[in-house]
């Protein structure tokens, strides 16, 4: 049983306390939800209260509803309980679904509690809920886990300053019911596991405080293993997001250059580089999405909408350093970058992306033909003077085709011969650890790109770092990255 534990997002429109990033908490929650869905895949997610920061704020119901909409994106069961910052319990459950007395998931019984708040941010469990703990065991042979906002543990077992005023009675009831695990929030520092007298207490850290953490608790019988996940990247790695989009992308969801720059700092990055789609800067939206221009590239005469000047001006107005302004030059069907020479001179670096091939537009696609077209277009694109090959082989995955492993070595050699880096990119993509390993072995540098179209994606490099591990690389990350002097 894998349990994801989120707590204390403290969402607000502003920043009531400096240490609480309530102003970006909605982005943090969305980032966590997507990481859980795609990469961690827990059996259940528990959300342990203090979703909002100020229950008396006029926008409190709206913020709770927004959080509910975000949590509704979870692809696994979720159990949500309120905390002391979430206001009236009945009003809270007018918005969120109130969990039943017990929630059974894959042989584990969860007992969620909404306890009485006490002065000093303590809590008391009522006699009715003490009896409910006893009922949890009736007819149930598997593990039982209690969920509560305030931590419960044997007094003196840890340094957490919060507990229950009737902790002895709660602990005694847990022992008699054979309840071995309590999962809690509230204490912002969090404690991965407090083990005392046969009881394990897991206290989730506050997701609103850097490094914006949540927990993964693995339950195997009586054994509980806890791992912290951080939404912020380790600043000491000096990571740079080398592929992010802007408000000029037709596929943009909420990107804006200034906001993205600020979030890059919040997420522990050393920098962020913007690489707007060249095709989206040259052609109007319908023409771009139809892909008609791919046959003739820049020579295509219809649907022109020249926005390169606007993009560059917006980047300058946002205070973006010149060396962080680039473009993602899409390759036409023959592999030529869709990028005017004069615009190439006005950006500091160019990454090249292959998005469409003629063979992929046919009703019946021949994988051998597509592979040949891919190799020919990639060869021309890599030799065109780009600095980075964006999302290598993603075009196959997007078209539900297997990336031909036989092409990994030729593409790696081509990159090496032309001094072009290979991008690790998880945006609608599953990059290959084998290809990354080949690149490292032949001396091809790598870049990390989020390909962000939504602010929550900026610098989301946990999967990138994991891919290096799966590729068998255990050296310094900086040694394999081409982050500096891309121009």
Image (cartoon, helix red, strand yellow):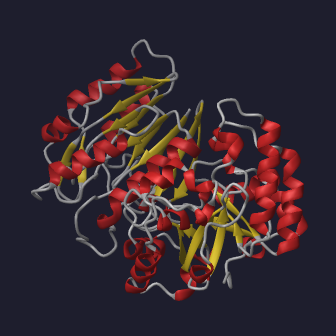
Q: Is residue 119 left or right of residue 379?
A: left
Quarter of the image with the C terminus in it: bottom right
Q: Position of residue 229 (x, y in %)?
A: 54, 55
Report the residue at 81% width, 62% height from top.
379
In the image, residue 46 above or below residue 227: above
On the image, which quarter does residue 131 sit in? top left
On the image, which quarter does residue 309 sit in? bottom left
Q: Position of residue 328 (x, y in %)?
A: 59, 67
Q: Position of residue 242 (x, y in %)?
A: 60, 71
User: Along the line of sight, which residue is nearer the eye, 167 or 15?
Assistant: 15
Q: Quick check: can you spot residue 120?
A: yes
Quarter of the image with the N terminus in it: top right
Q: Is residue 35 left or right of residue 374?
A: left
Report the residue at 32% width, 51% height from top.
163
Residue at far front of view: 301
User: Along the line of sight, which residue is nearer the eye, 381 or 57?
Assistant: 381
Report the residue at 42% width, 31% height from top.
77
Report the residue at 71% width, 55% height from top.
467
């Amino acid at each position: 049983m894998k349990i994801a534990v989120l707590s204390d997002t403290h969402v607000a429109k502003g920043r009531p306390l400096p240490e609480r990033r309530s102003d970006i908490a909605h982005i943090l929650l969305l980032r966590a939800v997507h990481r859980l869905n795609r990469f961690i895949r827990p059996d259940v997610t528990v959300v342990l209260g203090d979703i909002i920061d100020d229950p008396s704020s006029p926008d409190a119901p709206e913020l709770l509803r927004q959080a509910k909409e975000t949590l509704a994106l979870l692809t696994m069961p979720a159990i949500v309980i309120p905390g002391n910052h979430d206001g009236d319990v009945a009003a809270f459950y007018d918005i969120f679904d109130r969990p039943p007395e017990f929630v059974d998931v894959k042989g584990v019984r969860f007992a969620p509690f909404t306890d009485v708040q006490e002065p000093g941010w303590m809590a008391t469990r009522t006699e009715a809920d003490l009896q409910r703990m006893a009922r949890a065991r009736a007819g149930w042979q598997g593990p039982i886990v209690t969920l509560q906002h305030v931590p419960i543990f044997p007094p003196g077992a840890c340094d957490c300053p919060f507990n229950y005023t009737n902790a002895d009675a709660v602990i005694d009831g847990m022992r008699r019911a054979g309840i071995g695990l309590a999962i809690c929030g509230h204490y912002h520092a969090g404690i991965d596991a407090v083990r005392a007298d046969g009881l394990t207490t897991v206290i989730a850290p506050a997701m609103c405080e850097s490094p914006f953490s949540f927990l993964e608790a693995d339950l195997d019988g009586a054994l509980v293993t806890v791992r912290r996940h951080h939404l912020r990247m380790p600043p000491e790695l000096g990571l740079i997001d080398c592929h992010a989009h802007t408000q000029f992308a037709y596929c943009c969801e909420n990107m804006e250059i200034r906001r993205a720059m600020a979030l890059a700092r919040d997420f522990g990055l050393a920098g962020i580089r913007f690489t707007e789609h060249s095709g989206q800067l040259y052609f109007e939206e319908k023409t771009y999405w139809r892909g008609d221009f791919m046959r003739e590239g820049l020579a295509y005469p219809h649907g022109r909408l020249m926005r390169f000047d606007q993009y560059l001006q917006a980047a300058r107005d946002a205070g973006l350093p010149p060396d962080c302004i680039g473009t993602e030059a899409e390759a036409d069907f023959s592999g030529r970058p869709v990028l005017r020479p004069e615009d190439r001179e006005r950006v500091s670096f160019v990454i090249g992306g292959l998005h469409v091939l003629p063979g992929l537009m046919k009703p019946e696609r021949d994988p051998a033909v597509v592979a040949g077209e891919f190799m020919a277009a990639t060869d021309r694109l890599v030799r065109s003077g780009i600095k980075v090959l964006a999302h290598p082989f993603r075009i196959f995955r997007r078209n539900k085709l297997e990336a031909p492993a036989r092409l990994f070595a030729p593409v790696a050699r081509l990159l090496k011969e032309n001094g072009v880096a290979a991008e690790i990119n998880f945006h609608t993509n599953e990059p290959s650890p084998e290809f990354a390993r080949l690149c490292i072995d032949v001396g091809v540098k790598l870049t990390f790109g989020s390909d962000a179209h939504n602010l929550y994606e900026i610098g989301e490099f946990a999967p990138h770092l994991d891919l290096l591990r799966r590729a068998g690389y255990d050296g310094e990350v900086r040694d394999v990255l081409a982050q500096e002097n891309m121009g």
